[in-house]
Amino acid sequence: MAPDPAPHAAAVAAGAPSLGSRRRRPLDARRVARGAVPYLLITPVVVAIGAILGYPLYHLVSLSFQRYGLPELIQRQGSWVGLDNYRSVLEDRIFWDTLVRTVVFTAANVGLTMVVGTLIALLLLRLSTPVRILLTSGLVLVWSMPAVVAVQVWYWMTNFQNGVLNYILTEVGFGDYFQHDWYASTFSQLSMVTLLIVWGAIPFVTVTVYAGLAQVPRELVEAAQMDGAGPLRVFRDVTFPTLKPILLILTSLSIIWDFGVFTQPYLLIGASHVDASNYLMGVYVYIEGYAHSNFGRGAAISILMLLMVAAMSIPYVRRMVRMGDTA
Amino acid sequence: MRRRAWDAVGIALFVVLVFPVYWMVSTAFKPDDEVNSLTPTWFPTSPTLDHFRDAMARPYFWDTVRNSLIVVCAAVLFSIVLAFLAAVALAKYRFTGRKLFIVAMIGILMLPPAGLVIPLYVVLARYHLTNTLTGVTLTYLTFVLPFAVWTLRGFILGIPKDLEEAAMVDGSSRVGAFVRILLPLVAPGLVATSVFAFITSWNEYIFASVLLSDQSNQTVTVWLSYFYGTSRNTDWGALMAASTLTAVPVIIFFLLVQRRIMFGLTSGAVRG
């Protein structure tokens, strides 16, 4: 195609679109074509994303200003109501209760996931090779479990009649859990969801942190120990600073995921048992908007939720873009 | 000496973490009296395949497996082709708007699916695509496409530049260099990305459950979620057999590609 590929490759490698000596030459067709290449390459993705996501999102904004239920869906014509949907949501106690519950839930889930995940990663360092391989394989196995499957298994283990969790807790001596109903109160329901989510999320955190621990300079740790620093001190002053970027990324990812979680709470609490007393944000928007066919109001909730998640994503996206930029 | 104690902790932790998976598989193989007994049987003493037979004979199991395969394969194939082109642009060129494109890709990946249910449902209803596999495939592209773009970009970057340049000095054109050098090198990345995209789509639940209302039209995760019916009369053995059947392809695939993909979401932070 190009007779002089070498300088072109150099230009690409240097990240410059054109070499200085060429700047004064008139734009010839080949150079224009060359500049167009990356745009041609991304066009299919841009068009596809625009159609399947951009257009629906544009639609979402306009829906949120309309009364739009089942009749309007069939007639494909909503009626303009201005800010009514937003007003109705923001004046709704259920929205605020759900928001607070979701924030607390997210904090508990992310905190547990990060702490336990990091502790297991530190434990991996101290294990003999066979046990380390065993535990790592176990983690990967847990990681690979599909969410819907995990919910069913959890539901079976904690069922009222003969759940194995009830049996173990009773046998070990934590009290009488025979035919204990784990889904009787909101706190208990959400605790079960938390256990399920943390169990599923630990492997990703542990494996990533463990990989990061390999970056901790061995000599520094040894020097600190030589100077009489205990394990806590070594962690705080040597290990933690090295791990910090990884921990920050993992924490923000976990916050984003747990805040918007749907499948686990919806299915584990059960479609017929989710209500205003145990809503999390993802379940709330699904029930109020989709299940009640109140699409206009649901759109307003969706937008509020998406904006909150977008705000939470800023630090993560920034970091990833900085990395992407070094390409 | 201390290591022994840590190893004991490690083994105990392994048992606790893996127990739910073990309990799923072992329940699936137990006869009904062992499953329903008030005292659990820790190891199936007389394993049986009845529950698997039962689960596979349930209405719509094979239909929904087929639907899942169709939707997932369509979404992955379409995404990989489109995403590969965009990934080449990101890895090999600098252009105005590149940063915006990256922000869009990563930003989209962070959107919670529950927040997208309403717009996707309403727009697809407008084009009569609800309750069709095409409609679900389109919604899966919303997360498979950006994921594939970002992951493939990493794989392409991992190819040493001098290899490509050497090919061009040899007199090959850019396209020739691309086909003969870049493509074979990036093939493992393409496979890993496809497999991981396959897993994510296979596991997807909310879009499929919202869009597909006919039972024969649903995907296997939705089928599994409806399995127990009334909560007090669950056939636990069959449910665990069905769960195992749904999870096994995912687990096998996951074990194959986990190492290659895991840094996709955090890479760079770990780079030395």
Image (cartoon, rainbow, N blue to C red):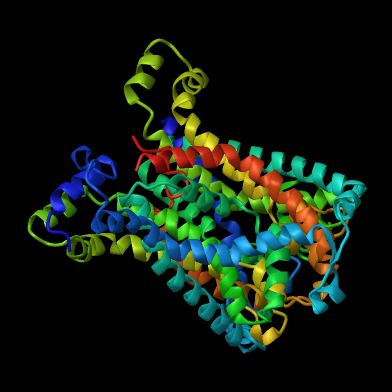
Asked whether, in this view, residue B163 is left or right of residue B101, the answer is left
| Residue A106 percent across, percent down from the top left | 71, 43
Q: Nearer the viewer, residue B60 or A327?
A: A327
| Residue B137 percent across, percent down from the top left | 56, 74
| Residue B67 percent across, percent down from the top left | 57, 82
Q: Quadrant of residue A38?
A: bottom left
Would you place residue A2 above or below residue A116 in this image? below
Total number of numbered labels?
0
* Quadrant the C terminus of chain B occupies: top left
Asked whether, in this view, residue A315 is left or right of residue B188, the answer is right
Q: Residue at x 60, y 82 (%)?
A: B64
From where the camera sits, is residue B16 visible? no
* Quadrant the N terminus of chain B occupies: top left
Q: Quadrant of residue B212?
A: bottom right
Would you place residue A130 above or below residue A269 in this image? above
> What is the residue that sits farthest to the left in this orientation?
B170
Q: Nearer the viewer, residue B146 or A150?
A: B146
Q: Nearer the viewer, residue A67 or A286?
A: A67
